[in-house]
Amino acid sequence: MTQTKVRFWQKADVDGFFGLFTNNLTNILVMAGLLNISIGLPANIAYGQILPAVGLSMFASSLIYTWMAYQLAKKEGRNTVTALPSGTSVPHMFLIVFLIMGPVYWKTGDPYLAWFAGLAWGFVEGLVELLGAAIGPKVRELLPRAAMLGSLAGVSLTFIAMTPAMQTFDLPYIGLISLVIIFLGWFGKIKFPFHIPVGLFAIIVGTIIGWLTGFMDIKEVSEAAKQVEFSLPTFSIERIMNGFSEAAPYLIAAIPLGIYNFFETIDNIESAEVAGDHYNTRQALLADGSTTILASLFGSPFPTAVFIGHPGWKEAGARLGYAWATGLAILLLTWLGLISLLLTIIPLEAIVPILIYIGLIIGSQAFQAVDLKYAPAIILAIIPWVGNWGQNIVDTALTSANTSAETQLIG
């Protein structure tokens, strides 16, 4: 019997790389906007300190999950194992910025103290995730599959697919063409010229259209190029210790959020198992907790997490390579300061349709992997996410108008 040689890169990983990379890049751009624009942290902290640490934690996370996939592929003797996708937890990104860092900064006027308070929060949340590894496997045994996959379906419908859909339809001559290419390639199994991977072909076509129609601007490329600056994350325990005094009133909330994070990881591991890859729950939770603590020690307040989307990337052909390649690309972009430059070259609308595809795959899996009699339970699990997504839309609109729902109701 010949032993299968496990490969760390396959041609099919190209599609997965562009998809997962797009997901993480979009999150980092939103993160930069929240830090630098929404709460007003200076650029030297947001871009020069926090983002390089985010890149480091994501790279470490991608290496761990690539290694787990490698071990699983060796154990089962197959080259069809797909690594768990990972990155910065999006819900926590908003909560840490607006619940911790923003209030501390607005109260004290000290951006460094606001940053340190965020680091203290992230450190505590990482500890909670590590503790969760002790009970995670038992929790996974007790939770019904319909409950876990239904929750993921809600996330996929709202936070994964809806915003990209809006961006796609907002600029249809780029977004819809990219979306059609993705559907034809991944659902219709159509091959494109020169055997170019589907995701890459969609991005190339969308980018060409963006430049030919004048949507992209060479002046923006020039301006972004001038702001490129190399930055490395720095290790410090003192920053975390200094942040505890300001973060203390908020730290109790880090416990339920840490619990939420390890539940989210458990859900995603269950989703991966349904797709054919059986990962160790405790190992994944330990990876999440340790890389979250690593992030806080090097300057990022944002926890890492296993991402939703494993079955989608698997269906697209991604294996081991897409995970570590994404981590490496994000590391280089954050350390070299190239994130803003990249998006002046490639229109985001050419990339985000990939996330619509992932949302469709995850949402479908919830109904395909359980008995039909549990369909009402899945719908019930989706409803809170739809409500939360709608509330966020309303709150964002009211905040932009310098008001709030409470103000309007009282008025």
Image (spheres, rainbow, N blue to C red):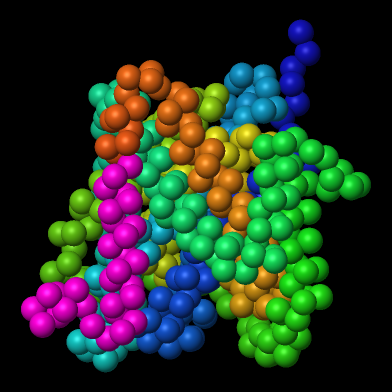
Quarter of the image with the C terminus is bottom left
Camera-side residue of 171 and 382 = 171
The furthest residue to the top: 1
Q: Is 16 left or right of 150, judged from the image as shown?
A: right
Q: Which residues are magenta?
A: 382-411
Q: Is 381 left or right of 168, judged from the image as shown?
A: left
Q: Is 307 left or right of 140, judged from the image as shown?
A: right
Quarter of the image with the N terminus is top right
Could you say which quadrant of the image residue 303 lies in? bottom left
Q: Residue at x 56, y 52 (%)?
A: 355
Q: Residue at x 55, y 65 (%)?
A: 167
The furthest residue to the right: 194
**How many numbered circles are shown?**
0
Vertical relation: 212 (above or below) 10: below
Could you say which quadrant of the image residue 331 lies in? bottom right
Is residue 13 at least partly visible in the picture? no
Camera-side residue of 331 and 245 = 331
Residue 405 covered by magenta stretch: yes
Camera-side residue of 41 and 282 = 41
Q: Residue at x 31, y 84 (%)?
A: 401
Residue 93 covered by magenta stretch: no
Camera-side residue of 96 and 69 = 96
Percent of width and height locating residue 376: 29, 29
Percent of width and height locating residue 215: 71, 79
Vertical relation: 12 (above or below) 258: above
Could you say which quadrant of the image residue 191 lies in? top right
Percent of width and height locating residue 223: 68, 90
Q: Residue at x 47, y 56 (%)?
A: 162
Percent of width and height locating residue 24: 54, 59
Dominant SS of magenta comes to helix
